Image (cartoon, rainbow, N blue to C red):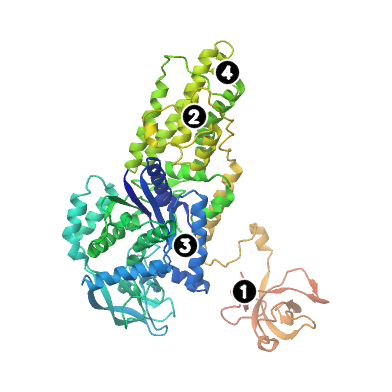
Amino acid sequence: MSRYTVTTALPYANGPLHIGHLAGVYIPADVYVRFLRRKGHDVILIGGSDEHGIPITIRAKKEGVTPQDIVDRYHEMMKNTFSELGISYDNYSRTTLPVHTETAQEFFLKLYENGKFTEEESEQYYDEKAGEFLADRYIVGTCPKCGNSGAYGDQCEKCGSTLSPNELINPHSMLSGEKPIVKKTKHWYLPLNDYQSFMEEWILKGHKNDWRPNVYGQVKSWLDDGLKPRAMTRDLDWGIPVPLKGEEGKVLYVWFDAPIGYISSTKEWAEREGKDWRPYWQDTETKLVHFIAKDNIVFHCIIFPAMLEAHGEYILPDNVPANEFLNLENDKISTSRNWAVWAHEYLQDFPGKQDTLRYVLLANAPETKDNNFTWKDFQIKNNSELADNLGNFMNRVSVFINKYFDGKIPALTEGKKFQELKRLSETAKEISGYIQKYEFRNGLNALMNLSHLGNKFFQERQPWKTIQTDIAETADTMFVAAQIAAYLAQLSEPFIPFSSKKMMDGLQLSYTEWDNLEEGIILLQAGSEINKIPLLFEQIEDEAIQYQISKLEDSKKKNLMTNLNAEPQKDIIEFDDFEKIDIRTGTILEAKKVEKADKLLEFKVDTGIDVRTIVSGIAESFSPEELVGKQVSVLVNLAPRKIRGIVSQGMLLLTQKEDGKFTFVVPEHVTNNGETVK
């Protein structure tokens, strides 16, 4: 038995989870851990919410609440989402807990006292009005590469370029809108360059053949460029305080603080379970595995290992199986554009279909390159692969045995051999080999190949016919089919645990260790009783898929809008309809309030073709006195309408601002009353 500590990237607690998160990190990690448990290993799955960092403070400022309000809300949402999807954490923690603050500060102090940091002064943007140093995300300006006026100090989200604040044109602070000044500040740096040789030996030589090419390649690129010192502290008011006297206002860099969250989460688990946390992080026999996405590679393969090496008491990662990105309908998933399938919304829209999502995301897992999720493919995989293939086979086998053999597994004719029975152990070994190499897509394919084999065997043997002519042959068929069903129930557990449990309950089985499956043991002995297994996967209708596609189309339309508060476009009219509209310039001659009507004003307007009465609901935006003599635009051929007993003979043209106040649509220059507006 081996010991494993498996971690998942800590998601920022500033928004909900989407399918890209699930496919890239959390579902693969759960498959891996469930498999290791079935192999009998001592394994813990550790995670938690990253509750510090700039994205959280930005969200809080936008909503006018505290950062704590934000992290409390989204931590619970993410924790519940993971639970509902069957992500089997041994502990899911959060980085605002006292155990984490204590652990992170102790770690910092150990490095500080052992002289592992360098203390350096640097110049950084400072907002004089807000009285704060500005993190990169708090600086906005024009991108020097594409001209986007809303680029951040670390990235332009329009063209995707990585930036630094001093590259921005006309930078300004998100806090006050003012132009920041440059001011000196002091921070503690981890000199990563001191660990260059160590990293080259540990990664480039030690993990060249067992780490994924995308991970190895990115790390090699960083090392080839030469590692440089990196600040481990920040000037912020949200984070873990630097544990040094006289250094108020400084906190630990979020990427120093966050990975230590794996250690503090393990401590929390050990305290609750009455165990010792140290072997899981300090015993060299333990294998440490980080599941992350590709944008976290540098932090988990260079910065965190350098921190662990500098500390001296911790093991280093055995593997970091980072995935690439999952796209949605051939477009990059974007939270800012709402181009995403949100996990909590999926669970509401497709109750009871957690395994369908797990299956589809594993089948499309971006293990070595970016991959794509489409709703049509989701429907096909559910209906054809899960419902018609796996679900149908399990149902047919159990129903047939209950109907013709009183729910008892028939005996196999003595000496009879079936190649299909040999495939059971071979499939268990295949899946085992794939999972241990972090090839979860291939492992899932091997499982489904066994399901295909079962359906093919059942169809070719035609037990519904042989039951009329040869009971012994039918018994042999159903014995073999039952063993295939039993192995499908057992082997599917890491991938689709909810459905696996239903299969196991129907077959009245308990989970066995994976090694027994690799040996090909018979799981359902002759005479064992089974129940009918209901249909495991319901068909997903076109209407449900179209609803999801329509939601994305709505997001796409909003992304094209330059003003998200603009009212939707009205129904299309023909040009002939437009030709009927008669808009003229006019001048307000008189204005007064309408009695017993807070919003209405009554006007006398010279339209050039007559002087007429018009009633308009703009009293909350203007006083009557300020409007007399104002030139306006008037829709003159609107049918008369009686308002509060007054016949209104037209309409003044206005626009409404975000605060609800109105402004007039007026000619650019004073013109004659009665001029036509076209």
- 459 or 180, nearer to the observer: 459
Distance from Cα at disc 2 to Cα at disc 4: 18 Å
Q: Earlier in the sequence, mark 1 or mark 3?
A: 3
In this rendering, the answer to whether 222 lies above or below 651 is above
- 590 or 496, nearer to the observer: 496
Give the residue number, with chain letter if any, for mark 3: 336
Label of residue 464 in the image: 4
Mark 3 belongs to which amino acid? Ser
| Crowd band around label 3 with a 10 angstrom C-alpha radius: few (<14), some (14–19), many (20+) | few
Distance from Cα at disc 1 to Cα at disc 3: 26 Å
Q: In the rendered image, is residue 143 in sight?
A: no
Q: Are marks 1 and 2 in contact (CB under 8 Å)?
A: no
In this rendering, the answer to whether 612 lies above or below 296 is below
- Residue 178 image point, x, y percent: 41, 81
Q: Secondary structure at mark 3?
A: loop
Q: How many marks?
A: 4
- Residue 6 image point, x, y percent: 36, 52
Label of residue 485 in the image: 2
Mark 2 belongs to which amino acid? Ala
Pair 1/2: label in front: 2
Q: Earlier in the sequence, mark 1 or mark 2?
A: 2
Pair 4/3: label in front: 4
Is residue 640 left or right of 6 when viewed as pictured? right
Extreme top residue here?
469
Is residue 366 left or right of 215 when viewed as pictured? right
| Crowd band around label 4 with a 10 angstrom C-alpha radius: few (<14), some (14–19), many (20+) | few
Give the residue number, with chain letter if any, for mark 1: 656
Q: Secondary structure at mark 4?
A: helix
- 166 or 1, nearer to the observer: 1
